[in-house]
């Protein structure tokens, strides 16, 4: 059964040059796995009913990207049972809306230079992480957060950064990067990864992102042979 996701890429702060590749990657995942991805940068879309969308994806959004009515619609949509997926700079978004920080579980603080490092997979019982290696070599910006999401309401941490594997980490030994939580009847998934264009060509990352989207949208996880675009 085909379902729909709404991919929002509006930026009023820093804009990632990987956004076009990221949107196309999500569309390709949808073609391969039975969902349609509608991409928008228009905040007015969120002022209309969001019922057609099983999940909303904030894909490297930044700054204030919604109107007050749009905020209300999004909050109600997730509370009522829809999914929300935040990718990378989604944690740098809607700083003026307190509910968004609670929804996501943590807000971006800073990051060191883009560099290789290691992701430590803590929980392989989730579709976004079950096919990843226990220690995943990756290149990204290794976001630090203003608070530790592990301490937020209902957060289930799926993967963390190994700060010993790169320079400039600021959170210490407990540095979550990927997590999920329930929001009312809805589901929220966030991954701090996804800065570079190359991420959206990486089969492991694409399988990771797909698992997060399917979980948030309450759809069956893809089989191991079906991961990627």
Image (cartoon, grey):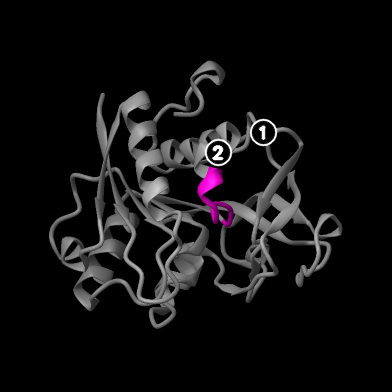
Mark 1 neighbour density, 10 Å: few (under 14) some (14–19) many (20 or more): some
Whether tag 2 and tag 1 are in contact, CB under 8 A, the answer is yes
Q: Which mark is residue 132?
A: 1
**Residue 142 picture location, percent across and down:** 67, 61
Mark 2 neighbour density, 10 Å: few (under 14) some (14–19) many (20 or more): many
Q: Does the magenta stretch include residue 193?
A: yes
Locate residue 229 relative to residue 123 in the image: left or right. left
Residue occupying the point 64% across, 65% down: 143
Locate residue 54 relative to residue 19 in the image: left or right. left
Residue occupying the point 69% across, 67% down: 113
Q: Main secondary structure of the magenta part?
A: loop
Residue occupying the point 76% across, 70% down: 171
What is the secondary structure assignment of the residue under circle 2? helix
Locate residue 43 relative to residue 11 in the image: left or right. left
Q: Does the magenta stretch include residue 70?
A: no
Residue occupying the point 43% across, 71% down: 93
Pick whichever, 182 or 176, lies toward us: 176
């Amino acid at each position: 059964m085909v379902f729909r996701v709404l991919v929002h890429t509006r930026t009023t702060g820093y804009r990632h040059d990987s956004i076009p590749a990221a949107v196309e990657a999500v569309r390709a995942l949808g073609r391969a796995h039975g969902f349609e991805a509608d991409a928008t940068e228009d905040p007015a879309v969120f002022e209309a009913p969001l019922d057609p969308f099983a999940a909303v994806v904030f894909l490297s959004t930044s700054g204030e990207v919604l109107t007050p009515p749009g905020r209300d619609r999004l909050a109600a949509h997730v509370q009522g049972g829809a999914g929300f997926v935040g990718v990378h700079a989604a944690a740098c978004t809607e700083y003026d809306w307190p509910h968004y920080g609670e929804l996501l579980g943590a807000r971006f603080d800073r990051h060191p230079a883009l560099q290789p490092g290691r992701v430590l997979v803590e929980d392989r019982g989730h579709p976004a992480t079950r096919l990843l290696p226990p220690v995943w070599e990756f290149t990204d910006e290794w976001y630090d957060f203003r608070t530790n999401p592990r301490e937020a309401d209902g957060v289930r941490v799926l993967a963390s950064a190994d700060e010993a594997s790169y320079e400039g980490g600021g959170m210490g030994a407990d540095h979550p990067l990927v997590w999920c939580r329930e929001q009312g009847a809805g589901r929220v998934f966030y991954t701090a990864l996804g800065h570079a264009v190359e991420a959206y060509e990486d089969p492991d990352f694409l399988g990771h992102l797909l698992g997060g989207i399917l979980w948030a949208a309450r759809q069956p996880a893809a089989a191991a042979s079906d991961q990627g675009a």
